[in-house]
């Protein structure tokens, strides 16, 4: 009944048409951990920060049920920093600053108490680091989910493919699926990517929803049409956190349950974008999440009468 | 129990990455009529062609249950001609040629036998011509559905708004919804457009599906993920034809039935793009359509257990 999340814990500075932030807490593992914590606790975290990372933000993670025993603090170094500016359409962004800092030589150490983890979520990191995590677990988890991005396809494709071959579920966006497969059609892309090893492929399409493929089936989950998207940062990670958290809660890795997990992940992501950074993820309630899931049910529900 | 379709009957020349056609039969009313004919016959057509339009193609329409009593043939003029080239992503295209020809001064004459129509589908035409059709019907149809495009927003916005205020359902794509409303968020766009008069708004998002809004509800229909899209020409009109045809067949204009109509329209559109032009719409069977509808059911179906 254990869940391990590996990824970045970072500072972000974000500009959107609605405003801009100073350095705020971000990072894939932060969003994944907070989101997953609404479904399953503890969330065992493996990550690294610098001496500049405030204790109060670590306390906040702990308060949400994140086990920080695996959070390395490098006193004399600086935390990973990313800064970006979203365009008016909120679907594209420019990266302004990327300072790897502590992430440059991250050695993911797995605390003994994290061994025998059942569910592993590999947030976006170098594929070498992601693979090291898998290799350092004495028993293979029941389900390994991996997120990645185009950056690694460009600079470390062979390493990336090696890691992809070791996971059960790969989660990427539509452009990345096209880039990784060389196919424009997402159906063809999915076939090629599933042939690389994963049993399942999640294709995230942002405001257009998400697709789940295995070799026999495909499921489509919409995104909730929203009045305002204030900040898309972390939406994909929040989605992944809701997905793995729901799986860990229900302990069911069937395709039918993965569909439910995707709906729950989508519900969490739809909350995430309503405020800047992680803000909206800090005070959700189970009722609010269930209400949002119900919105998804109503959004896609139709009855086709039998002929 | 009568259905009236007004729109262009045309020649198209199409280039896609998969090939190119000579002049083939196209036009909004052609696609709408063929698609609707699988659900309801006859499809009463009001349109205009030139003396260059082959009798065999008129016979083909008649064979599919299209009533061509309202098809004007201007012996000494030429049929509307459109030529376009699709880009590699199949989501964008360049118009190469537009020759209005007979469409330039189209006066839509309604045969007496078409009066008392219950369902009216206004395919893309100038908003003045669309409005003339409504005004020439002695009794207002139970449901008026209107398709239009960005072109009219640019050159005839006031006329367009006047016509929009007279219809029940407006069908446009996402970019057009943004252009017409000045809002990027489709939720906000829908509110503004519904305030212009229509009770329902359909927002077509191509490969990303379609949304149906009224003032209280929203429904999302996915597009079927396809291995290959050979030619997107006419997909939106085929969707509209399936929509209005299903409504005319079932005689039910409730929101719940409009959802089913959208799924049937989406199923028809997913067939349309499998071949060039109207080819795939010429030999479908009720079973094939039901199979495709079932694919949509499976694509979005999930079960959320009660807590």
Image (tube, coloured by chain):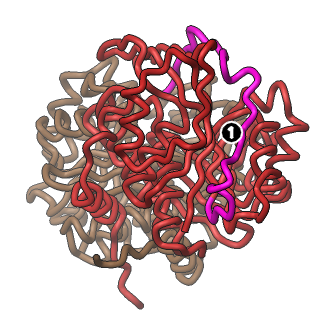
Chain colours: A brown, B red
Which image quarter is the C terminus of chain A in? bottom left
B6, above or below B187, in the image: above
Quarter of the rendering containing residue B120: bottom right
Coordinates of residue B86 in the picture (x, y in percent): 45, 18
Give the chain letter at badge 1: B
Query: The magenta stretch spans which residues?
Result: B90-119
Taking depth in this image into account, of B293 and B221 the one nearest to the observer is: B293
Q: Which residue is mark 1?
A: B148
Residue A172, placed above or below residue A200: above
- Can you say whether B14 is above or below B230 in the image? above
Q: Residue at x 46, y 43 (%)?
A: B238
- Mark 1 is surrounded, within 10 Å at the Cα level, by few (under 14), some (14 to 19) or many (20 or more) other residues, namely many
* Image x and y of residue B209, in percent: 48, 48
Please tell me whether residue A285 belongs to the stretch shown in magenta: no
Q: Residue at x 22, y 46 (%)?
A: A133
Q: Is residue B93 magenta?
A: yes
Q: Is residue B6 left or right of residue B259?
A: right
Query: Could one spot residue B201 in this view of the protein?
Result: no
Question: Whole-percent x and y of residue A119?
Answer: 24, 63
Residue placed most toward the observer, A245 or B266: B266
Left or right of residue A238, residue A130 in this image: left
Indicate the secondary structure of the residue bearing disc 1: loop
Residue A53, image x, y percentages:
58, 47
């Amino acid at each position: 009944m254990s869940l391990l999340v590996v990824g970045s814990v970072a500072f972000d500075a974000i500009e959107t048409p609605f405003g801009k932030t100073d350095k705020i807490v971000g990072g894939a593992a932060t969003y994944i951990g907070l989101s997953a914590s609404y479904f399953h606790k503890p969330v065992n975290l493996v990550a690294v920060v610098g001496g500049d990372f405030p204790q109060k933000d670590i306390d906040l993670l702990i308060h949400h049920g994140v086990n920080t025993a695996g959070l390395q603090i490098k006193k004399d170094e600086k935390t990973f920093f990313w800064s970006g500016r979203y365009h008016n359409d909120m679907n594209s962004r420019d990266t302004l600053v990327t300072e790897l800092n502590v992430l440059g030589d991250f050695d993911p150490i797995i605390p003994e108490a994290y061994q025998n983890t059942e569910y592993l979520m590999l947030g976006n990191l170098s594929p070498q680091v992601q693979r090291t995590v898998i290799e350092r677990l004495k028993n293979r988890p029941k389900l390994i989910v991996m997120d990645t991005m185009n950056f690694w396809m460009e600079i470390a494709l062979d390493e990336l493919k090696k890691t992809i071959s070791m996971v059960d579920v790969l989660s990427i966006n539509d452009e990345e699926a096209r880039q990784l497969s060389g196919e424009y059609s997402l159906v063809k892309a999915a076939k090629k990517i599933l042939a690389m090893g994963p049993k399942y492929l999640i294709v995230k399409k942002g405001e257009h929803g998400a697709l789940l493929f295995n070799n026999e089936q495909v499921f489509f989950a919409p995104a909730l049409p929203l009045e305002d998207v204030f900040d898309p940062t972390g939406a994909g990670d929040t989605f992944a956190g809701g997905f793995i958290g729901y799986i860990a809660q229900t302990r069911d890795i069937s395709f039918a349950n993965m569909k439910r997990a995707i709906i729950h992940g989508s519900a969490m992501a739809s909350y995430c974008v309503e405020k800047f950074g992680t803000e909206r993820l800090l005070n959700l309630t189970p009722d609010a999440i269930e209400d949002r899931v119900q919105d998804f049910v109503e959004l896609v529900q139709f009855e086709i009468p039998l002929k």
